[in-house]
Image: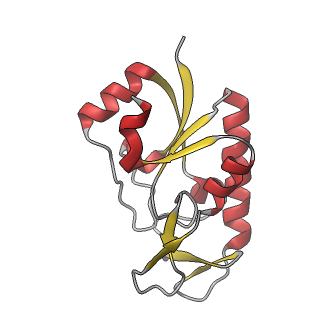
Amino acid sequence: MKQPLLISECLLGAACRYDGNAKALEPELLSRLMARWTLVPVCPEQLGGLETPRPPAERQGDRVVANTGRDVTAQYRRGAAQALYLAKLFGAKTALLKERSPSCGRGTIYDGSFSGALTPGDGVTAELLAAEGISVFGESEVEKLL
């Protein structure tokens, strides 16, 4: 029986990113993932109540702020909690998330200055999932899951 894998919807081709686009994995990689795992798609930003498209946001310490100045921390936390709920519901112990995102990024995220600079850190969802014992991988690490 295949194990469940929580996966960022945008990596599957869903147009749910802040800019209304997707960042789909290569079809061959998706086929290999589907052969190995039962995919559980999530978009924490949408689960948290944010619209698509939406202004870009970045982590600034414990807060998440849109480039308009709007504090969207509550929506990011709610989305992270919903992603965790789905991981537990489906028994997912592993997640494949969109890198550098203020929600899904793992290890490196944008630094909060909206300049394109990166800094060590995790997105809100990646941080919560990891704290709950779920192994989190970014899309550049997909081969580790195959």
The residue at the far top in this view is 1
Task: Say which quadrant the N terminus sits in.
Answer: top right
Give the quarter of the image for residue 19: bottom left
Q: Looking at this view, is 134 or 77 the one in front?
A: 134
Q: Residue at x 33, y 47 (%)?
A: 24
Q: Residue at x 49, y 63 (%)?
A: 52
Is 39 rendered above or below residue 100?
A: above
What x and y, as percent, mark residue 110? 48, 75
Give the quarter of the image for residue 143: top left
Q: Residue at x 68, y 38 (%)?
A: 86
Q: Looking at this view, is 5 or 106 the one in front?
A: 106
Q: Looking at this view, is 120 or 21 the one in front?
A: 120
What x and y, as percent, mark residue 43? 55, 51
Task: Say which quadrant the C terminus sits in.
Answer: top left
What x and y, as percent, mark residue 95? 55, 40
Q: Is residue 51 left or right of residue 144?
A: right
